[in-house]
Amino acid sequence: MEKIGVAEASRFLAQASMGATREQIARVQQLGYAGWINEQMAMPSSQSRWDYLVSKKLNGVESKNSEAGHDAAFWKKMLSSPDTLRQRVTLALSEILVASLSGFNASWSNFSSAAHMDLLETHAFGNYRSLLQQVSLSAPMGEYLTYRGNVKVNPTTGALPDENYAREVMQLFTIGLVQLNNDGTPKLSGGLQQETYTLDDITGLARVFTGWNYDMTGTDNNTPDYKRRPMILTASRHDTSAKNFLGSSIPAGTDGLTSLTRALDIIFAHPNVGPFIGRQLIQRLVCSNPSPAYVARVSAVFNSDNNGVKGNLAKVVSAILLDTEARSASRLSDSTFGKLREPVLRFTAWARAFKANSPTDAWAVGNTSDPGTRLGQSPGRSATVFNFFRPGYVPPNSAIANARMVAPEFQITNESTVVGYVNYMQTVVSKGVGDVKADYSALLPMADVAETLVSELNLVLVAGQLAPATTNLIKGGIDSMPKGTEAARLNRIYAALVLVLASPEFIVQK
Amino acid sequence: MQNKNGTNASRRAFLQRASALSVAGVAAPWAINVAAMAEASAATATDYKALVCVFLYGGNDYANTVTPYDASSHALYQSYRPNFAHSRAALAATALTPTVAPVDSAGFQHQYALAPNLAPLVPLFNDGKLAVMLNVGTLVQPITKLQYTNKSVRVPPKLFSHNDQQSIFQSSSPEGATSGWGGRIGDLFQASNTHSTFTCINVSNNAVFLSGNTAVQYQVSTSGSVPLAGIKNALFGSTSSSAALRTLMTQQRSHVLENEYNRIGKRSIEANEVLTSALSSTPAPKTVFPAANNLGDQLKLVARMIAAGPTLGAKRQVFFVSMGGFDTHDGMLTNHPGLMTKLGEAMAAFYAATVELGVAEKVTTFTASDFGRTMAGNADGSDHGWGSMHFVMGGAVKGKRFYGTAPIVANGGPDDVGQGRLLPTTSVDQFAATMGAWLGVSNSELLALLPNLGNYNASSRNLGFV
């Protein structure tokens, strides 16, 4: 096997991790791509977000209506958990199977959010069908998409089952709105796209998600424990009439759990699931506009692993990262390849590269949602179930639109965020945020020589992709700065970091 | 890579339009007309007018916003949502007394009341500054219930889907649309503004509504444009590094994604220099906006921008503000009243600010949303619907009136497609055309910028509310 170069390893880590480090670059070179993936997948999970909140004693009744610890629990994992591939995939899944802090009930919303994210992490290399089952039974999702406590048709009041989950589980979590080919392109009939379901399908499926509620056995709501127990069924509240949807029928009289399981089986059997989920995972890890052939290769793995099993996420993730379209150096000269690096991943790239740490375990990065002063995105805080950005977002009136491309992350990109991000990072790289501060000890010996310093940042943060002109521009700036003292060296490091983090080559991951 | 923004010379703007079209290659038919007609319109805009879209994300519940109030309709309304209906007593103070009673297709005269928490809007209605648009929604062409049932008439794609219906309301196309009707209005008028960048202004999150074929959505935060710290002051003491930063963020790039990002960066940095100066030299309106109300914060910034309009040389502007949280599948009683309070207080304050600025007749504000919701509820909320009720506010509005046809309150009745999901009797295109005409868009231009408007009789394209 030909040895993997440092820049190639760094590029791989931009797709497969929360951010490259010198250590991980060496590890990829040592193990090879597949070996590194296997090592990562075999790693144990670090402390869960839930357990972090408990360790901070936030499960006491006095904290019941507090969000305290939520952001810290999320950031700690993203910035420091050694299973960096699992964290990246968990983030990707959390942008498909979305739930967010603002949409949970006020009581223990931080624990709801932690439980949801922990569940995604548990199944990140598991099976998508199992994940779907667990998510559908989870109290946080029951709250977020409002089917917890959902009633059957009430002939007296005329109340109908809440349709929210029935709709979004199909539109967002599994099959999408239009029939797809295996390569992710829409199936056309007479030139027109074919919708996957109708209003009647929603009404039929909504009957499935009735009768589910918290499992309060032996507990009350003064501890958060019920938020991570699967919901339980109250049989009398479940709609036992026949449920017709997607051309299938669950017979009248079927019990609630069987109904839910069969319903998810029916949805999961839809040929859209592979291309619909596979393409989005490619978009989260590698590029916004994968070729149909790339999507088809990933869909094929999604549809059937070596053992003929559908939904094996470990195999899907491997297929995405090892695909020639992800790995081939030729894509670097394609002016349409890659993806806008989403703001939280720009932040984690800096933090991971320079070992940002929280000496007090407070991880006090906080809520970074403000677009004018922070990142315009904050983990676990999407405004709606439609994520921070949509997989099909097209920046209007742009060359991207003219090229018939999509660019999801541009949905949260505007005149405020482009500047707000750079302003925020200028403070962060120099002062840290909260108690989270970087360790620049490895950079200090390089700082007096601009070329050495910029070259190091280029490798770790940009996979060596800075254009020579960009390198010269940055080097010119740093060369103008004083050197020779530690304070001067730190200023050179801060300025070089801001410039690299603001460079278009970093902003767009390729 | 062309850079299409940051110009104000009309000749250049025209060339850019032509250029944009040639790049698009596959431009929709209306785009060509828009570009061809742009210059004539631009020349005529010498006064000031602004249109403000207040988008209610999530699909606002029409029935708890503009609530049936006459005894028989209210009784039905209450029967369809027994757990979360406003009582008649609670509605008495916000019952509307229009100059003309709204009538349904069967000739029945309806009475309506605003949500109790919309009380701040009642005086505006009574003063004739607020009108209510009944049962407006996304449509391709007029449609009857029978045609809907028989699928004999085209309907918008992806009905009841949030993101797609948001997009269709804003642009006439589902998610992936590349221009909206607010932006297409901007195409027509941006050459008459000194700074074309300040034509389509978004104080919220990105919305296709404000992007035209050439007009570009310009986003500002509620405190104005965001200055780049690293060039405002030398970057860690280095002016040379500041210059490098500016270049990195604004230079043209050959990579398509990089170039689009820098196009935004360039616009941001250049516009900030103009806007910060204009805003700081213009006294802010004294009108008190509601505290802890993000929509109010957004509208306050709109008011500040309108105040700075003469300094900026603005003649026609389209603004976009929004609030979220309207997807009330549950908790209607706990959540919706608070949303109405914020909406009502923010809109009333904004109107007061336009009066203070002496531009009340020059500013028209309207609400929009993904869709309406079901009349027949689930246990404690309502589900995705279609047609809805919206407000139009401003000194030029012919208010104290309802426009459109009152829907018959029913579940599976003549005006709904089940569960009280209203089959729209007025299209968003008619709603938009009426406001476009007020701004000075000609009839032929309206047909170009609203692709489905031609499916309506010429006499019904302008609803006459402004």
Image: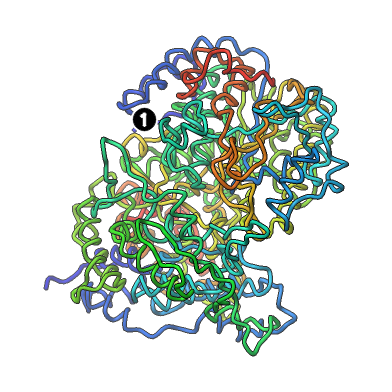
Instruction: Please provide percent x and percent y for residue A494.
Output: 50, 61
- Residue occupying image coordinates x 31% and y 71%: A313
Where on the picture, by quarter, is residue A101?
bottom right
Instruction: Please provide percent x and percent y for residue A314.
Output: 29, 74
| Depicted A284 relative to depicted B361: above or below | below
Q: Which chain hosts label 1?
A: B
Where on the picture, by quarter, is residue B344?
top right
- Residue occupying image coordinates x 42% and y 39%: B157
Viewport quadrant of the C terminus of chain A: bottom left
| Depicted A209 relative to depicted A373: above or below | below
Instruction: Please provide percent x and percent y for residue B207.
Output: 53, 40
| Depicted A305 relative to depicted A157: above or below | below
Camera-side residue of B386 and B433: B386
In the image, taking residue A250 as reference, residue B132 lies left or right, namely right
In the image, taking residue A452 as reference, residue B440 lies left or right, namely right
Query: Residue beneath label 1, please?
Result: B2
Camera-side residue of A430 and B150: B150
- Residue occupying image coordinates x 53% and y 53%: A421
Say which amino acid is labelled 1: Gln
Q: How is the image coloured?
A: rainbow
SS at badge 1: loop
Specify the farthest residue to the bottom. A218
- Residue A476 in sight in this render: no
Q: Circle 1: is it few (<14), some (14-19), or many (20+) Cα within 10 Å?
A: few
Instruction: Please provide percent x and percent y for residue A284.
Output: 37, 59
- Residue A236 in sight in this render: yes
Where on the picture, by quarter, is residue B127?
top right
Camera-side residue of A471 and B327: B327
Camera-side residue of B203 and A209: A209
- Residue occupying image coordinates x 67% and y 40%: B409
